[in-house]
Amino acid sequence: MTLTTASSRVDNIRHSLVGLKMPRALEMLDTTLRRIEQGQIDGIEALDELLLEELSLRENRRIKAALRMARLPTVKTLAGFDFSFQPSLDRNRIMALAGLDFINRAEVVHLLGPPGTGKSHLATALAVEAVRAGKLVYFIPLADLVAQLAKAEREGTLRERIRFLCRASLLVVDEIGYLPVTPGGGNLFFQLVNARYEKGAMILTSNRGFAEWGDVFGDPVVATALLDRILHHAVVVQIEGSSYRMREHAALVPENLRANALVNPPPVPKRRGRPTKGHEDRPFG
Ligand code: ADP
Ligand code: MG
């Protein structure tokens, strides 16, 4: 091949990469060609490298977009979870859940335990695994979910809203039990749970035992019907440790207050909009 034909071929390649929308391969092209010239790699290796680079860019973009769609409050990972801090928790059990078979089986995973024991962290980390595996995920605190359903009901769009919430193959409902559910909220949540029953997986986190769900939902009949659905095909993970948030300062909090704080946390104001930057949390930028 003459120098001119080689350079017009490189122009062709550049043109094709633009047409195919392969920005990363385009960016890498010159370096790759130089490495071929210098005998560092052959043609097959060059092709392989360029395509892998492009593929990994696309995969990262897909994951980023899917994480946004999932509305995770922060990104947490299983690698970032210190299992040695929670000895009551069986690491193998959590790692088995990360295999995501529970999603294919449309099971419900309950993460139960006092505040600060890592329920939301684990729920988020499992949701991240599911997103990476290409599953459609949606994360929402119970109070927001009930508000969403109540608004849809007022506007006559409850069926559509429930259908939307059934699309995700994993629905994470966080913070069951922290705030009292508004009147009628238990019934709305039941309708959603019933629609997903045996069809879509869920992860539910709660600081209250199932016996207290009558109080949480303000209606023992609804709570019983709910529990009937969500304890069938269920995995219950009980965490019985101390708060990771308080780990450095627990000694400063008197014993009686510490116990109260674990049983009855003060109501947290409802978060609106983007999460504020926390030192350990990484909101999406
Ligand atoms: P919960 O939902 O049970 O109230 P979180 O999951 O929100 O608790 O945990 C509170 C904070 O402590 C979060 O920033 C979380 O990432 C962190 N955290 C909790 N447990 C652990 C742990 N075992 N290892 C690492 N970080 C943890
Ligand atoms: Mg939480």
Image (cartoon, rainbow, N blue to C red):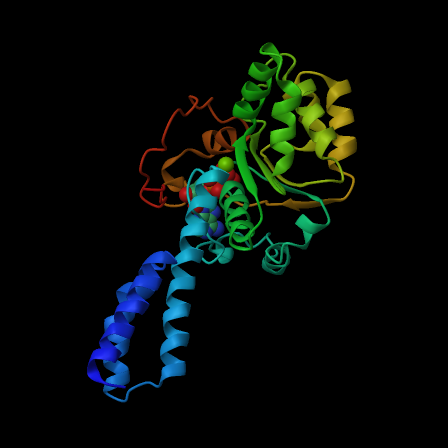
Which residue sits at x=71%, y=45%? 106
Q: Quadrant location of residue 108?
A: top right
* Residue 42 image offset from top left, x and y in percent: 35, 86
Residue in the foreground of this view, choosing between 152 and 33: 33
The residue furthest bottom is 39
* Residue 157 image offset from top left, x and y in percent: 61, 17
Q: Is residue 55 above or below residue 168?
A: below
Q: Is residue 243 visible?
A: no
Q: Quadrant of the C terminus?
A: top left
Residue in the foreground of this view, choosing between 278 and 89: 278
| 277 relative position to 111: left or right | left
Which residue sits at x=70%, y=21%? 214
| 16 relative position to 170: left or right | left
* Residue 122 image offset from top left, x and y in percent: 53, 47
Q: Quadrant location of residue 225?
A: top right
Q: Quadrant of the N terminus?
A: bottom left
Which residue sits at x=45%, y=51%? 62
The residue furthest left is 3
Q: Is residue 73 above or below residue 270?
A: below
